[in-house]
Amino acid sequence: QVQLVESGGGLVQAGGSLGLSCAASGNICSIRSMGWYRQAPGKQRELVAVITDGGSTNYADSVKGRFTISRDNAKNTVHLQMNSLTPEDTDVYYCHAEVVHISRSIGDYWGQGTQVTVSS
């Protein structure tokens, strides 16, 4: 089993910045990709940003140039730096990891979610 523990988030004014962090622990041999998704009530969960173990990144068009994702492979952590936030960024943000277990099986895991609220 793998646990993802998120931290960060909260309330910020439009134009401000926030950082989200996620730490993975448990039955981990390696982590192929780590990323952040967000979901508003009644809507589908959508990709915000993802980073591979090789450092390749992919961002949603709506956050390009404002958000930066990074990871520490040795610590199994991922960080999302969010700048120039707008009220449209208000959502629950979820950490995701594609984990290779010690047995070499692969599993997808999610964090519990953290609220980000941007006031106008």
Image (cartoon, rainbow, N blue to C red):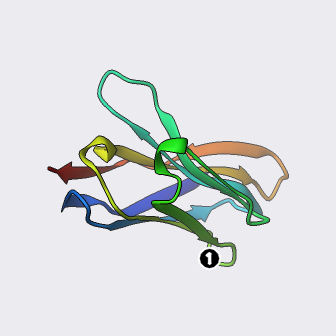
The image shows residue 53 at horizontal and vertical percentages of: 75, 63
The image shows residue 52 at horizontal and vertical percentages of: 73, 58
* Residue 35 against residue 53 in the figure, above or below: above
- Label 1 sits on residue: 75
The image shows residue 46 at horizontal and vertical percentages of: 50, 35
What residue lies at 46% left-to-right and 32% top-to-bottom? Answer: 45
Label 1 sits on a secondary structure element that is loop
Outermost residue on the left side: it is: 120
Residues 67 and 1: in front is 67
Q: In this view, does 88 lie to the left or right of 99?
A: left
Q: Is residue 15 left or right of residue 54?
A: left
Q: In this view, does 19 lie to the left or right of 59?
A: left
What residue lies at 24% left-to-right and 45% top-to-bottom? Answer: 87
How many marks are shown on the rendered structure?
1
* Residue 67 against residue 94 in the figure, above or below: below
Residues 115 and 67: in front is 67
The image quarter in which residue 92 lies: top left
The image shows residue 102 at horizontal and vertical percentages of: 80, 59
User: What amino acid is found at the position of numbered circle 1 in the picture?
Assistant: Lys
The image quarter in which residue 88 lies: top left
Residues 65 and 102: in front is 65
